[in-house]
Image (cartoon, helix red, strand yellow):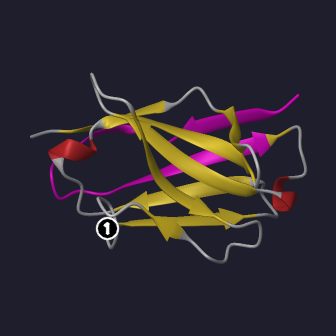
Amino acid sequence: EVQLVESGGGLVQPGGSLRLSCAASGFIFDDYAMSWVRQAPGKGLEWVSAISWNGGSPYYAESIKDRFTISRDNAKNTLYLQMDGLKSEDTAVYYCGKTDPLLGVDYWGKGILVTVSS
């Protein structure tokens, strides 16, 4: 059974940093690209970032480019999202997703809330 469990969210002041983690199990982690997707209150899903199976070719949404960094540790079956320079508009539930090259995100974690507020 595929399981994705996010952690590391919480309340942070504008300009602050957080690092999200996503612990993966139930599939061969280093066979798949992985993604982060977020949903702000009252809004739709927004793709944030993706990374290939070997950690290369990271992709970022324009809204977070140069502030967020995606990475992975295949030995630990864990995906990360380092978020720096956080803004109030980054407030959202963040989901990690196993990413199939044809289907897109085919499994989702339950999500973790990030709140950016003073």
Along the viewing direction, whichever of 101 and 6 lies nearer the viewer: 101
Q: Is residue 84 magenta?
A: no
**Depicted 7 relative to depicted 110: above or below:** below
Q: Residue at x 76, y 50 (%)?
A: 102
Quadrant housing the N terminus:
top right
Q: Is residue 32 left or right of residue 88?
A: right
Instruction: Report helix, strand or loop for mark 1.
Output: loop
**Depicted 18 relative to depicted 30: above or below:** above
Q: Residue furthest front?
A: 102
Q: Residue furthest top?
A: 42
Q: Residue at x 64, y 42 (%)?
A: 97
Q: Is residue 8 visible?
A: no
Q: Residue furthest bottom?
A: 56
Q: Position of residue 75 (x, y in %)?
A: 82, 64
Q: Residue at x 9, y 40 (%)?
A: 118
Q: Quadrant of residue 12?
A: top left
The residue to which callout 1 is attached is 67
Q: Position of residue 61 (x, y in %)?
A: 39, 60
Q: Position of residue 30 (x, y in %)?
A: 84, 61
Within 10 Å of disc 1 (Cα), the crowding (few <14, some 14-19, many 20+) is some
Q: Residue at x 63, y 45 (%)?
A: 22
Total labels drawn: 1
The segment highlighted magenta reads: 1-24
**Depicted 89 relative to depicted 112: above or below:** below
Q: Amino acid at mark 1?
A: Arg
Q: Is residue 17 magenta?
A: yes
Along the viewing direction, whichever of 38 and 23 lies nearer the viewer: 38
Q: Quadrant of residue 17?
A: bottom left
Q: Is residue 23 visible?
A: yes
Q: Position of residue 93 (x, y in %)?
A: 41, 32
Q: Main secondary structure of the magenta part?
A: strand
Q: Is residue 24 left or right of residue 87?
A: right
